[in-house]
Amino acid sequence: MTEQIARVIVADDQAVVREGIVMLLGLLPGIEVLGSAKDGEEAIALVAELAPDVVLMDLRMPRCDGIEATRRIRSEHPGTQIVVLTTYADDDSLFPALRAGARGYLTKDANGDEIVRAVQDVMAGRAGLSPVVQRRLLEQVASAPEPSGPKLPDGLTAREGEVLALIAEGLTNAEIARGLHISTATVKTHINNLFSKTGIHDRAQAVRYAYREGLTRPPGSNIT
């Protein structure tokens, strides 16, 4: 089976860098260079004229930068994929480029094999990311805060808020345990914790607190 030849355009505002990339690509198997552009406007025009498979796109360019060019190419020519090839791997460059539609992202220290792999990956519908970029994305996901619901008063957890709402409905500990599918001992632990956090001492005060803080549940809601 013959390997598909990737038809590529290079966009970079620095002539020496652009010509060097074109020369390198000309030596790599599986890549045909259709042309090169010195800014985003030229890249967009070349894509419209030549319909390449992939654009290797620099980010910092005059007239129309790489992010805007990526956005327009992906909108107007969805059959062309974008692999960013840039000096920068900071968040202010990486994430806007990916949001604009780039499927690959390499830094300019990438070697020929990495460029070929990224081009092949984006043509196959995969992400073509350098190891540095992959690590940055993983770090971003790992450091992102977990999604949470509305903030509860006095540091109550979501489960303590549920238990408090059920107390306000007049349920016993056993009924709360059955409804939440937890043990009565766990219910008691939640009650002790929420009493301690809120400074209330009995169920009557708990009911007043729940209504005051808007923690009662809508009528007819189901706890199972």
Image (tube, helix red, strand yellow):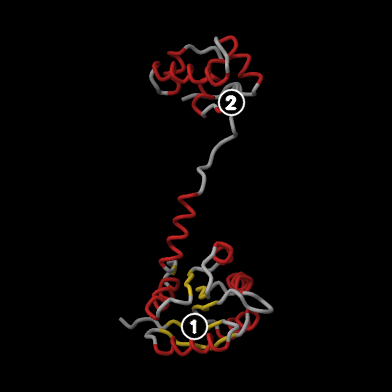
Tell me the residue at 53%/83% (across/down): 10
- Mark 1 highlights which residue? 8
Q: Residues within 10 Å of mark 1 (few under 14, many from 20)?
A: many
Is residue 187 in view? Answer: yes
Q: Nearer the viewer, residue 100 or 75?
A: 100
**Residue 204: % across, % down:** 59, 9
Q: Is residue 111 above or below residue 149?
A: below
**Amino acid tagged 2:** Asp
Q: Quadrant of residue 154?
A: top right
**Residue 2: % across, % down:** 33, 83
Label number found at residue 145: none
Farthest left residue? 1
- Mark 2 highlights which residue? 154
**Residue 79: % across, % down:** 52, 74
Which quadrant does the N terminus fall into? bottom left
Is residue 82 in view? Answer: no
**Residue 144: % across, % down:** 51, 48
